[in-house]
């Protein structure tokens, strides 16, 4: 296996390519239906500080910033191109900020954030155990971590993605993610599946699913949300 610094560099290059192709912005439409129920569960107060790990094109940071008029939303991404585009797009959002950084070495002081969320990113991290320890470090006592992913063991309709990823990805089950949370020091750990209510198209010609029926089954199984408290 590639050493971690090389894997991180491969991730940076791959997601810089995604950013340059405009794929970051396109993810808002795809991920919003599974993210909205998580925002409801987070039950944010106006003064909280929230970190989005793997913030991509920054759309979730904008949504968070709207909910945090007295607090701050910070987006962090390993792709400097994603961060550059987010900064340019959301320059007018005063309580939003974007930084380049990796989940396994978060460039922030300990005990700062009240929540950390990560959407469709954690299975790419070169070292998810270290990423969760880092999230635990930057959260305040009582702060909560929320990891949301579509590529996981209990949703068989995502397993074929492994063959399309340019960088290696972790196909863990809910129990394995929960164990990583526990080892990182979290308590009150739980998981649930969040179905995506978006109607599937009549036909599907993309490369991520075999056909429209598989896309429908994938959305019915939904995304995996794992959360825990510091
Ligand atoms: C599929 S995109 C999702 C982006 C965004 N969360 C969204 O839902 O639109 C995955 C993102 O995770 C970022 N990423 C991957 N590995 C990372 C790491 N180790 N640390 C921080 N960000 C990472 C990528 O650069 C990319 O922007």
Image (cartoon, rainbow, N blue to C red):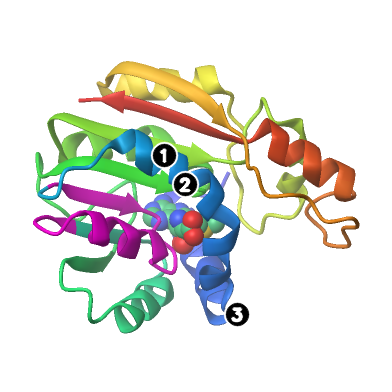
Q: What separation in Å lies between label 1 and label 2 (alpha carbons)? A: 5 Å
Q: Residue at x 79, y 46 (%)?
A: 215
Q: Residue at x 25, y 32 (%)?
A: 144
Of labels 3 and 2, earlier in sequence is 3
Residue 82 is left or right of residue 45, and the answer is: right
Ligand 1 is within 8 Å of the C-beta of the residue at disc 2 = yes
Which of 202 and 191 lies nearest the eye of the viewer?
Answer: 202
Label 2's element?
helix
The image quadrant of residue 88 is bottom left
- Residue denoted by label 1: 38
Q: Point out the stretch of residues depicted in magenta.
A: 48-72
The image quadrant of residue 140 is top left
Task: Specify few, some or many for label 3: CA neighbours under 10 Å numbering under 14, 14-19, or 20 or more.
Answer: few
Checking the image for residue 60, the label placed there is none
Residue 79 is left or right of residue 101, and the answer is: right
Of labels 1 and 3, earlier in sequence is 3
- Whether residue 58 appears in magenta in the rendering, the answer is yes
The C terminus lies in quadrant: top left
Q: What separation in Å lies between label 3 and label 2 (alpha carbons)? A: 23 Å
- Whether residue 92 appears in magenta in the rendering, the answer is no
Task: Specify few, some or many for label 2: CA neighbours under 10 Å numbering under 14, 14-19, or 20 or more.
Answer: many
Residue 87, position in %: x, y?
A: 30, 78
Q: What separation in Å lies between label 1 and label 3 (alpha carbons)? A: 28 Å
Dot 1 and dot 2 residues touching (CB under 8 Å): yes
Q: Residue at x 74, y 49 (%)?
A: 199
Residue 182, position in %: x, y?
A: 34, 18
């Amino acid at each position: 296996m590639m050493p971690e610094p090389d894997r991180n560099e491969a991730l940076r290059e791959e997601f810089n390519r995604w950013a340059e192709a405009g794929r970051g912005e396109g993810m808002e439409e795809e991920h919003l239906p599974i993210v909205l129920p998580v925002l409801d569960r987070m039950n944010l107060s106006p003064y909280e500080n929230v970190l989005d790990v793997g913030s991509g094109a920054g759309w979730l940071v904008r949504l968070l910033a709207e909910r945090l008029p007295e607090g701050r939303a910070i987006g962090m991404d390993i792709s400097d191109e994603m961060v550059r585009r987010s900064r340019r797009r959301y320059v007018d959002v005063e309580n939003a900020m974007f930084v380049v950084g990796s989940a396994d070495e978060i460039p922030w002081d300990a005990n700062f954030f009240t929540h950390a969320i990560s959407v469709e990113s954690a299975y790419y991290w070169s070292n998810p155990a270290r990423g969760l320890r880092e999230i635990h470090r930057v959260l305040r006592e009582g702060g909560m971590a929320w990891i949301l992913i579509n590529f996981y063991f209990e949703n068989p309709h995502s397993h074929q993605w492994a063959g399309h990823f340019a960088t290696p990805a972790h196909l863990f089950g809910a129990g394995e993610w929960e164990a990583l949370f526990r080892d990182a020091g979290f308590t009150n750990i739980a998981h649930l599946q969040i179905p995506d209510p978006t109607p599937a198209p009549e036909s599907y010609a993309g490369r991520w699913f075999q056909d429209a029926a598989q896309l429908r089954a994938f959305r019915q199984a939904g995304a995996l949300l794992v959360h825990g408290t510091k």
